[in-house]
Image (tube, helix red, strand yellow):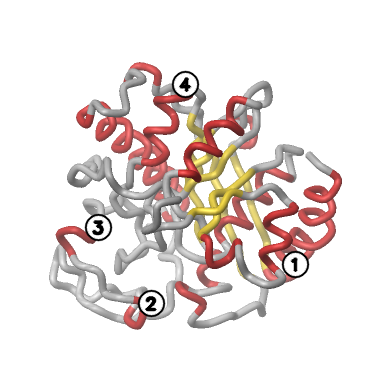
Amino acid sequence: MTPFYRFAARGAIIPFLKGVSRQHVTGAENIPRDRGFIAVANHLSDLDSLTAMRALVDEDVPIYSLIKSGLYDAPVLGHVFKAGGQIPVYRGTAKAGDALVEAERRLALGDPIMIFPEGTLSRDPLRWPMTGKTGAARLAMRTGVPVLPMGQWGAHEILDTYNKSFRPFPRKDVEVRIGEPLDLTRCGSDVEDKEAVRACTAEIMRAITALVEEIRGQKAPRPFDMKYDGDPGKGRLGTRRPDPRTGETAPDAATGAAPARDEDEPPVGPDVAADEPGQPA
């Protein structure tokens, strides 16, 4: 962990998160300590990368996220990301693939990498993980490093989807669950094998979804897939709208409130081998 990373994380980011949240982490014993790995998590808020980072930095493990270029090139925040060694993703450009190349180089050096496999903030009306894109699976197949699944819930109650509402007070509970590392070497190393890539992507998303199910105390429906279920657009995210899978209006979609705690296996979507690598917050 570089001095600047330590300063930014422990001197600024973590104190900010402590001021707006009570973070509860389980499964820290599953974090690999002797090699690089790919951390993967569900994506509900622009705070997700910070809450996931905190869970790892609290264990003295630095994490390097793939950051969308709009944040990486921002006037002030961008300097922090650059100095902290984060990796920009220039989606929809000739440089889009550079992020995975750099991530692969970092993994070879033993650095942990963070990817949000959904590729964007979840459009699911009930805020479950969507179908995954294949960047994380392809990176794992090329490098042979373990994939560390993480499920998280609660950051969206502080900063809602696409920053529609910032509610720092009262402090919110944020839960992060870290699962056992996934060994995807059985998928092989041929990233042109679409069936193998889809299978690895499915396994990654199943692991993430299972952790979110544990946190929420509910069973997830089949994964929301924007290719089939549509994209409601930023203007409708977080609003009450019918769930295209059932036709019912999601009861907690308006507020993002977590369902009460006392309350089939999700398939992967269609071939997304040409999709962009995972996009962090």
19 left or right, relative to 134: right
Residue holding disc 1: 16
Q: CA distance from mark 2 to mark 3?
A: 15 Å
Q: Secondary structure at mark 4?
A: loop
265 left or right, relative to 203: left
- Residue 38: give its label: none
Q: Nearer the viewer, residue 6 or 150?
A: 6
- Residue 238: give its label: 2
- For the point 61% across and 65% down, which residue is it? 73
Question: From the viewer's perspective, is residue 245 above or below residue 237?
Answer: above
Mark 3 crowdedness (10 Å alpha carbons): few <14, some 14-19, many ≥20:
many
Question: From the viewer's perspective, is residue 13 above or below residue 160?
Answer: above
Quarter of the picture holding the N terminus? top right
- Residue 224: give its label: 3
Q: Earlier in the sequence, mark 2 or mark 3?
A: 3
Q: Nearer the viewer, mark 4 or mark 3?
A: 4
Q: Earlier in the sequence, mark 1 or mark 3?
A: 1
Residue type, mark 3 in image? Phe
In the rendered image, which quarter is residue 279 located in?
bottom left
